[in-house]
Image: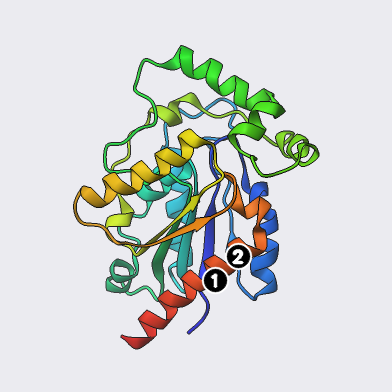
Amino acid sequence: MSKPVFVLLHGAWHGPKCWDRLIVELEKAGYSASAPALPSSGSTPPVPDLKADIDIIRSMISKLAQERDIVVVMHSFSGLAGGTALEGLDKAACFSKGLKGGVVRLVYLAAFLAQEGSRLFPPGAEENMKSYIDMWRLTASYAKGMFYQDLDDHEVAELAKDLQTQSLGSFQSATTYAAWRYIPTTYVECTRDRPATLIGQRRLLETAKESGTHKIDRIIKVDSGHFPFISKPEWTAQVLIEEAGREVRVIAQR
């Protein structure tokens, strides 16, 4: 069987460039990866919700599923759009439509493991959200504490130059589907993430498992900050390849 392709979904304030180091490592191992630009980050004018992100994700994966199996990797905020966008794109559903591929595994990297109806902020929180977002967008020192905890200051300053604006409406948009209920799922917990975020990761896992049907079958811990694929690209690539390989072996045995 051919190797699955990785679809890499970036989080808030970032773009596809944040995946560059990881893509290099995946390609060294003979794997291909696609990293779409999600409109909730960097759009002018800003988008009102997550619909544009969801549409781009669905379009890319629907095309890939014509021929390829897919591992979807979500980082941070993209767990909301990614988890919603995959309805009907799992391997079994795609096979029933006569397609050769489909999504065989999800990997959440310190990402929002959101249940149906989840949103990051409630409607009416625009003013507080705006000041919060502007701090993240403009201040490299703030970005280090929030995003790049295990990187040196020089590297953080360079990474901060690529931070983008984030559409406020994307934080108020509610999810409608939870793909991790239906597709085998790996969660990567970053233990050097900021304390509140680490607590949030663990709480999301706990509540997801308690909420009913799920396919969360792997939890991996890594000694890294919020961006293991920047600080530890070789390690991240190895983990993704191992997770993809497990799915290929399972499918081959059926």
Q: Residue at x 70, y 57 (%)?
A: 21
* Residue 51 locus on image (x, y percent): 41, 38
Is 159 drawn above or below residue 91 in the view shown? Answer: above
- Name the residue at 65% across, 57% down: 232
Classify the position of the C terminus by image quarter: bottom left
Q: Amino acid at mark 2?
A: Ala
Where 155 sits versus 63, above or below?
above
Residue holding disc 1: 241
Secondary element at image label 2: helix
Relative to 145, is 64 on the left or the right?
Answer: left
Label annotation for residue 237: 2
Locate residue 23, reporting x and y percent. 66, 61
- Three-letter amino acid code of the residue under disc 1: Ile
* Horizontal and vertical percent position of residue 3: 53, 77
Q: Quadrant of residue 99?
A: bottom left
The one of 88 and 239 positioned closer to us in this rendering: 239
Reply above or below: 143 against 74.
above
The extreme top residue here reads 127
Q: Mark 1 packing: few (<14 Cα in 10 Å), some, or many (20+)? A: some
Residue at 32% of width from left, 74% of height from top?
98
Mark 1 touches mark 2? (CB < 8 Å): yes
Q: Residues within 10 Å of mark 2 (few under 14, many from 20)?
A: many
Total of numbered circles in the picture?
2
User: Disc 1 to disc 2, how far (Cα)?
Assistant: 6 Å
